[in-house]
Image (cartoon, helix red, strand yellow):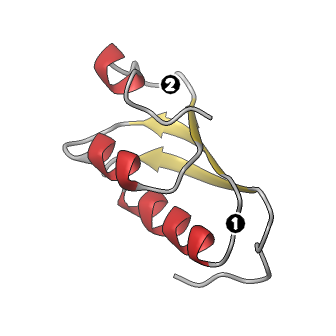
Amino acid sequence: MDLIGSVNGKDCILIDDMIDSGQTLNRASEELKRQGAKKIYAYVTHGVFGDGALDNIKRSSLSKLIVSNTIEIPKEIQMGLPED
């Protein structure tokens, strides 16, 4: 994963089309945090949330995850998502 520019001391926004396993958002948020980002927000269009996705997101450095309603997200997943 490559990061272009400086995020040190800044709030960052990740945008993705789909979250299935959560690994991409996890890796991206960890790299941003490692580079000094203060808060990391993610916006995702399609929340598939396959097996292990919620655990990957909980382990990430995301401050908040916002997912559109193109796919119904079960309440137990909604309740476990990071919220600032």
- Relative to 26, is 47 above or below? above
Q: Say which residue appears at 50% left-offset and 68% top-offset.
A: 30
Badge 1: residue crowd in 10 Å (few <14, some 14–19, many ≥20): some
Nearer to the camera, 20 or 65: 65
Nearer to the camera, 58 or 78: 58
**Residue underneath mark 2:** 70
Q: CA distance from mark 1 to mark 2?
A: 29 Å
- Amino acid identity at mark 2: Thr
Q: Quadrant of residue 14?
A: bottom right
Q: Quadrant of the C terminus?
A: top right
Indicate which disc residue 4 carries.
none
User: Quick check: marks 1 and 2 in contact, CB under 8 Å?
Assistant: no
Q: Quadrant of residue 34?
A: bottom right
Residue 22, image x, y percentages? 37, 52
| In this picture, residue 36 sits left or right of residue 66 | right
**Residue underneath mark 1:** 37
Q: Say which residue appears at 59% left-offset and 84% top-offset.
A: 2
| Mark 1 or 2: the one toward you | 1
Secondary structure beneath disc 2?
loop
Q: Say which residue appears at 25% left-offset and 41% top-offset.
A: 50
| In this picture, residue 36 sits left or right of residue 77 | right
Q: Say which residue appears at 32% left-offset and 52% top-offset.
A: 56
